[in-house]
Amino acid sequence: MPEHSQETTHNARAWDKLARQQVPLAQPATDADLIDPLAKVDPLGWLDSNIRDKQVLCLAAGGGRHGALYAAAGAKVTVVDISGEMLALDRAVAAERQFDIRTVQTSMDNLSMFADREFEIVIHPVSTCYVSDVSRVFAEVARVLKPYGLYISQHKSPVSLQTEIRSRDDTYRITEPYYRKGPLPLVEPCRVRESGTLEFLHRWEQLVGGLCRAGFVIEDLVEPQHADPDADRGSFGHRSQFVAPYVRIKARRINSSPSTSVIELA
């Protein structure tokens, strides 16, 4: 594994531990998931109806789920993750299911082992919160994507990371500054925070603006619905009525040069 910063080394160890604990995010794809894998990975129809033989990078996506689903849909899959234990789950699933999945252990902001324009699609589940500088991630994704390649990413909403986990009289207070620096304080394990990890709040200008500055055009943006009006007070479904926990973004790589992309969009 290439040398990494202190924060990524910490998070690699944290995710190794979470994988050994078999947390929900370290649960491989099931038989039911693989019946119609494209429906599972593309509920919004953002991908073409057929991704067979497409070069797909599942970024920071170890755990035996994403790689298996895309491989089952016929894609040529590479899974990148900082955690060796999470990648071990992908290799186990690939061996069991006879999938051809390449695994690479590295940080999401260091894809130097890949060639320019190597991939047609990059799939990036919630994980940018584990790096302090998200612009480096976007620059690397832009480099390894082919022109007009698709980048589908999901992120923790900044307001969700600002907001306390537990309710007070059916309300949730904002307790973290929007312009904070450094990692967020550790909290108890829950659906919106992972135990033992260092997480960073990225503002909307860093997420949406950062994608644009890296040479992407944003084609769609949604906040997946997790609110549950019947959920118990303080639960994930209850909190999601007040704060959308995630945002999912569909972006298209138009140029490798940000300056050129501004000229073309003018």
Image (cartoon, grey):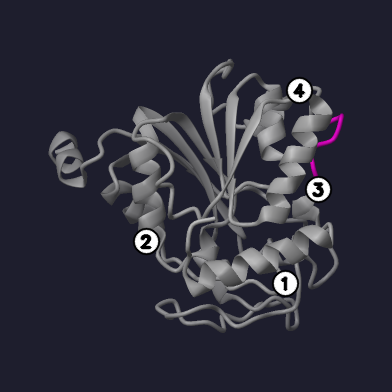
Residue 84 in sight in this render: yes
The residue under the point 42% across, 80% down is 181
Task: Check disc 4: other Cα within 10 Å, few if <14, some if 14-19, many if 20+.
Answer: few
Image height check: is 39 above or below 244?
above
Contact between marks 4 and 2 (CB within 8 A): the answer is no
Pair 4/3: label in front: 3
10 in relation to 266, above or below: below
- Amino acid type, mark 1: Ser
Q: Quadrant of the C terminus?
A: top left
In the picture of the structure, the residue carrying the numbered disc 3 is 27
The boundaries of the magenta stretch are 28-33
In the image: residue 186, left or right of residue 36: left
Q: Secondary structure at mark 2?
A: helix
Compared with 20, 40 (above or below) is: above
* Residue picked out by circle 4: 36
Dot 1: what SS?
Answer: loop
Residue 121: x %, y % from top left: 48, 31
Frontmost residue, 165 versus 225: 165
Q: Earlier in the sequence, mark 4 or mark 3?
A: 3
Residue identifier under label 1: 195
Q: Earlier in the sequence, mark 1 or mark 2?
A: 1
Q: Is residue 139 left or right of residue 29?
A: left
